[in-house]
């Protein structure tokens, strides 16, 4: 299935998701290149809410650009399989090999990114058309940061993860939503 079909089949859980899904479908159907960062206004990213098997912990990284504990993920960089992107990013950013709890989209968000410096070059403000997947990993295995992107990687209890992030919008609008959806994916 294509991303546009996955988004059309996705059941939004709230008004934010409904609006963002509609906009993402519109953008995809416009024919605009959305899978490369060369689109300076907006492009697709994939994130992962990585939980342990008991669904009691979440894996987060302390991101250098945002100076905050946050979920894992990254740019599509031409790959239209956003689940593959999420899996790759988790392994690159944490050293953890995760697997999908479900291959279906877990959450959608259009995120604003302020202008910033990366690798000595200015990146203008833009939008991330973000698709999130629910992944599972063994919280007993070692983790390691990806030094050029994050300072640390750690597992936190679900409530503790909300307190660790210093980005109130992400906590209130996204991370609480992601934790709340876990009830639909109980531990095995």
Image: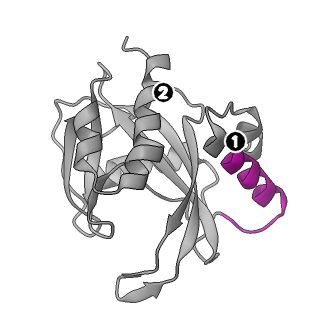
Instruction: Identify the magenta region.
Output: 19-34
The residue to which callout 2 is attached is 181
Q: Is residue 177 above or below residue 172?
A: above
Q: Main secondary structure of the magenta part?
A: helix
What is the x, y in percent for residue 59?
28, 40
Q: How is the image coloured?
A: one colour
Quarter of the image with the N terminus in it: top right
Mark 2 nearby-residue class (10 Å; few <14, some 14–19, many ≥20): some
Tag 1 near tag 2, CB within 8 Å: no
Residue 106 sits in quarter: top right
Q: Circle 1 sits in a helix, a strand or a loop, which is it? A: helix
Residue 132 rendering spot, x and y as whole percentages: 52, 43
Tell me where residue 111 appears, x and y as whole percent.
Answer: 54, 59
Against 159, residue 147 (above or below) is below
Give yes or no for residue 54 being in the magenta stretch. no
Q: Is residue 166 left or right of residue 100?
A: left
Q: CA distance from mark 1 to mark 2?
A: 16 Å
Point 31% across, 31% down: residue: 137
Which residue is at 69% across, 41% downward? Answer: 18
Q: With 92 as the anchor, is 25 left or right in this view? A: right
- Mark 1 or 2 closer to N-term? 1
Above or below for 144 versus 113 = above
In the picture shown, does residue 106 fall above or below 149? above
At a point 33% along the width and 66% down the height, the residue shown is: 66
Q: Which residue is mark 1?
A: 18
């Amino acid at each position: 299935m294509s991303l546009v079909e996955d988004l059309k089949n996705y059941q939004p859980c709230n008004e934010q998701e409904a609006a963002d899904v509609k906009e993402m479908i519109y953008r995809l159907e416009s024919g605009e290149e959305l899978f490369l960062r060369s689109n300076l206004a907006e492009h697709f990213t994939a994130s992962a809410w990585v939980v342990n098997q008991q669904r009691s912990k979440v894996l987060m990284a302390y991101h250098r650009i945002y100076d905050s504990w946050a979920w894992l993920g990254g740019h599509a960089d031409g790959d239209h399989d956003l689940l593959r992107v999420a899996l790759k990013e988790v392994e690159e950013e944490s050293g953890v090999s995760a697997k999908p709890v479900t291959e279906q989209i877990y959450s959608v968000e259009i995120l604003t990114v302020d202008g910033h410096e990366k690798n000595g070059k200015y990146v203008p403000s833009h939008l991330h058309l973000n698709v999130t997947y629910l992944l599972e990993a063994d919280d007993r295995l070692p983790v390691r940061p990806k030094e050029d992107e994050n300072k640390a990687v750690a597992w936190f209890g679900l409530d503790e993860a909300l307190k660790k992030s210093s980005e109130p919008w992400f906590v209130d609008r996204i991370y609480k939503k992601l934790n709340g959806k876990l009830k639909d994916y109980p531990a095995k």
